[in-house]
Image (cartoon, rainbow, N blue to C red):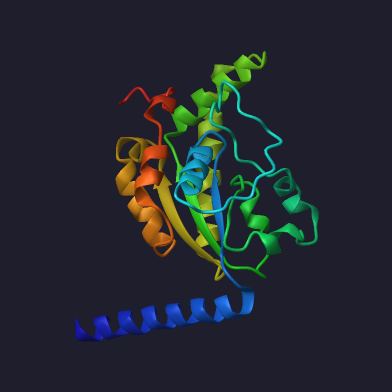
Amino acid sequence: MATDCRDHMRSGTAGALERFLRRLRYGRPIVVVSGLPRSGTSMMMQMLQAGGLEIVTDAVRTPDGSNPKGYFEFEAVKDLDKGAPPAWLAGARGKAVKIVSSLVRWLPETYDYQVIFMERNLDEVIASQNRMLAERGSLQDEAQNARFRHLYQTHIEDTLRLLRGRGSVSMLVVDYSETLARPADTARRVDRFLRGRLDVDRMAAAADPALHRNRSRTE
């Protein structure tokens, strides 16, 4: 038992040293909010902004019925998989940027990242996506829901495995429904993860339960 404790302490010390050295080399971490579309990434960006963290957004995509409080997107993010590391990443250090889960694998190793990964019941994700597309006039084949659920589950597992294996990434997984049910708990977890940089009360107040419109049938 004593040996296990000493090994854990050495491991923790080594991890802290590695983070310190990376900070010296690469500067402040970039806070990345990721997850599937409709998994609560916009809500988390809103919470971070309310807590006092500067966010990276160009406001090109404006609020609508699907996201009445805004999407908090940055158009240049969509080019992450196009080749050379984008110049805007240097300016994102110490700030938060939303990057959909299919693109986080393209983040270069030349920066440090604190990834807040949003998870949500996949039936709710699919229902929310279908509703948004229907509002835009696109008919959805609900017979495909089971197929999409399987694809999304595999994608999430692969993405989390990849992120956990990267030395440039530290990660916190946050559940969407739990955040809306207990926003103060999530705000405190996120604040600890970001090393006490945020106004927890303002963060918690920004999580709006009224936005939880596509609930799973098990709730």
Name the side, left or right, on which 92 lies relative to 115.
Answer: right
Q: Is residue 15 above or below residue 80?
A: below
The x and y percentages for residue 96 are: 57, 53
Q: Residue at x 55, y 30 (%)?
A: 147
The x and y percentages for residue 200 are: 36, 51
Quadrant of the drawing holding the N terminus: bottom left
Q: Is residue 62 above or below residue 55?
A: above
Name the side, left or right, on which 79 lies relative to 186.
Answer: right
Q: Depth check: 193 or 68 in front?
A: 68
Q: Is residue 91 above or below residue 140?
A: below
Q: Is residue 172 above or below residue 98?
A: below
The x and y percentages for residue 166 are: 56, 67
Q: Residue at x 44, y 78 (%)?
A: 15
Name the side, left or right, on which 138 lies relative to 128.
Answer: right
Q: Is residue 74 visible?
A: yes
Q: Depth check: 111 or 195 in front?
A: 195
Q: Residue at x 61, y 63 (%)?
A: 93
| Image quarter of residue 202 | top left
Name the side, left or right, on which 146 lies relative to 76.
Answer: left
